[in-house]
Image (spheres, coloured by chain):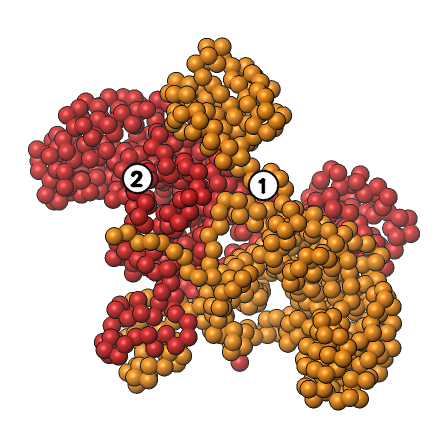
Chain colours: A orange, B red
Amino acid sequence: MAQKPSIPKGTRDFSPSEVNKRNYIFDVVKKHFQTYGFQPIETPSFENSETLMGKYGDEGDRLIFKILNSGDFLNKVNDALYATKDSSAITSKISEKALRYDLTVPFARYVVMHQNEIDFPFKRYQIQPVWRADRPQKGRFREFFQCDADVVGSDSLLQEVELVQLYDAVFTDLKLEGVTIKLNNRKILAGIAEVIGERDKLIDFTVALDKLDKIGIDGVSKEMREKGISDAAIEKAAPLFALSGSNLEQLSVLSELLRDSEEGSKGVGELRFIIETLEELGLQSANLRIDVTLARGLNYYTGAIFEVAAPEGVSMGSIGGGGRYDDLTGIFGLKDVSGVGISFGLDRIYLVLEELGLFPETIDQSLQVLCVNFGEKEALTSLKLVHQLRRAGIKCDLYPSSAKMQKQMKYANNRNVPFVVLIGEQELGSNSFVVKDMVKGGQQTYSLDTPELFYQGL
Amino acid sequence: MAQKPSIPKGTRDFSPSEVNKRNYIFDVVKKHFQTYGFQPIETPSFENSETLMGKYGDEGDRLIFKILNSGDFLNKVNDALYATKDSSAITSKISEKALRYDLTVPFARYVVMHQNEIDFPFKRYQIQPVWRADRPQKGRFREFFQCDADVVGSDSLLQEVELVQLYDAVFTDLKLEGVTIKLNNRKILAGIAEVIGERDKLIDFTVALDKLDKIGIDGVSKEMREKGISDAAIEKAAPLFALSGSNLEQLSVLSELLRDSEEGSKGVGELRFIIETLEELGLQSANLRIDVTLARGLNYYTGAIFEVAAPEGVSMGSIGGGGRYDDLTGIFGLKDVSGVGISFGLDRIYLVLEELGLFPETIDQSLQVLCVNFGEKEALTSLKLVHQLRRAGIKCDLYPSSAKMQKQMKYANNRNVPFVVLIGEQELGSNSFVVKDMVKGGQQTYSLDTPELFYQGL
């Protein structure tokens, strides 16, 4: 009995329409990556396990998909270990490879392995799938694409400036106007923790602060107190709760608050440079906003932190993010490689474009012209015309069999074809073809000697 | 101590230049897939094991990469089975998913699962990586891309005609002129075996016949005899050894040889239709040649068989192949879906284009313009120009720091940049910029008010 097929949970088939829409986003992103001087690399889907393990914390390690060794893999497990039946201990003996969990660690490995071929500063982009054994849920998949651009080997703040411009260029081109690019700096967060005297509660502090919009000043203060942050500290931090106004106004509040922290002041200076330069250069459609509650990747980032929010009114988590890190490649033995990068959240951007109806109308037009098939002799003449149209770059097809007209027209409708070409016996006799306009209605006759009169208008 | 990183054997990192070249091939192929009316789908990288296992023979099953279950996977193995330490028997208990081995089985699964959304005939293309635990060797990898186009739900021979045209269109567009598209038909092979009275030795017969070029008539006869094919049969098959001349001449020899075999005659008729129609339509640069020794995928194909050979003088195995199959989806419970498909061998096409120097010259030009960085103030003005160029679609960059001129020029050279822009103090004063032509030498000054006078020529 035949199997009833299914796919693993957390994975997806993509239909033609979905692939076309995804590629539309990728193509726009790639175009701008390239005009910004980024170059593509690709790394293998699986890495040696030791490349990945231990890089994402214990929880990350658990979520990495491991690949079973080939052949008699149990043979390599000694009997004493085998007797324990300890899955965790036995894993490393029966699995030496694992699917990549993100693009960052493979990129770090790439930079170290290829350091002698690379011209630094190295601006690379990478758009490939990653895999995580996460519990699947709405919007969270076990296989999904990441889309990253990073510059390594330059500590110039101009990189941060450019990355904001790049976000602006991509979202403007996608017609997704009005996104908000939120900016913060790890040094500002550290400075705040220092100034209020709670250096080691930095994470608790920012997690609580991040909820300001949702639970208000009282809620945030309460949570901070529960986490053991002193009343004195919370009072000192009060200016942060009221941070508002323009970016430049916020910068002066921060500058004042952090004037006794060297690190904090440095962070304010960096933020100021990025913001002032961008005000000078201008953005096309994105908003730029300081957000000191932005603490993503806090263990990782050392300078600027970015996050992109969808335009107001669209309820969606962040559609992009990134930041500066000081030591990407140290884990693989190459010290002092500073970098800064951003990523685009493909799946969420897709949902936002879908919700706002921003995909181009022609995206589902996988066929521009369909020729009806009236039989062998007519089909041969049709094929000649089809061939001419294809050579002119028109997406065109001949219905493969001389099925009933009704069936062929139904197929044309289902495939959303704007023009149907008819070459029947009569047209064969008069060396002509008829074009039915499926959108506006009506039809027109052309000579087979001058098909360009038809297709040049497409 | 830091790890010295490496990648799993049989896998590859792709550098920017390699990714650009690979994408160049993919883009050409995709363009023609689309003008021929094919639509893209994508399927997950891993499938449920039962979807893949048993579809590729025992050897195939062994080469499928299995993914280890998450969590305490050994817990699901009962003690009696565990005690056997039998890797093969335990595999299915600790692994439920596997990386796809090709694109055909996932496509069959897709068609069955999505049959109610698909408008048949369904022309799909799919370009995705596959994985095989093969022993790596020169030109054989454990991760590689397949690139397939198939039509299912139509038994019209016009599909075969179109697929040959599609090969011709792609290779012509890649400037790879003079490829040979070899054509055969499974029914002809079956007819031959029938006529010479060796029906069940069909595979031995064709394997031997396939060596005609290399070992000559005597060698082939010897091998056939060793495989137990009778002298009488070999004598009857003699016309095949001498098959030469034009396709139409070969067709008459075959037609005569196979006149007593119904199946064989049907095969000759199909081949004749395809060849005559293509002679009528014409090919741009490919040669079309009957090759009755072509027996690829013999267990699988039921009608036409295709294979593409690189132009003469290039020593390379086939760079593409395909054929018609009668029952793609039967294994998943959907009967009577006939299909025909072709594939492109990306890695080999890449090597051929490289060998013949056919990649476009501009492919390694990842940056068209580099602005030298003379310091903060100059950089700001440079950034404005860079931004204008980027908005015009020019791949452009500002060197991120005001490093020594020599270092910046070396970077420009290494990245193969054709134009370097200089905005120093003097240019700032005169509101101008200097463009150095790195290819032809010489330089020219433009006003910052009319940068289009420079970039419109790019």
Drawn side of residue B70 relative to residue A339, left or right: left
Numbered disc total: 2
Residue B88's disc number: none
Q: Position of residue A419 (x, y in %)?
A: 55, 27
**Of residues B332 and A455, which is closer to you in this image?**
B332
Relative height, residue B296 to residue A378 (above, below): below
**Of residues B99 and A32, which is closer to you in this image?**
B99
Identify the residue at the far right of this view: B429
Image quadrant in which you'd find residue B131: bottom left
Instruction: Look at mark 1 in the image and give the residue it sits on.
Output: A363
Q: CA distance from mark 1 to mark 2?
A: 32 Å
Q: Residue at x 18, y 28 (%)?
A: B262
Q: Secondary structure at mark 1?
A: helix
- Under mark 2, the amino acid is Asp
Mark yes or no: residue A110 visible: no
Residue B336's disc number: 2
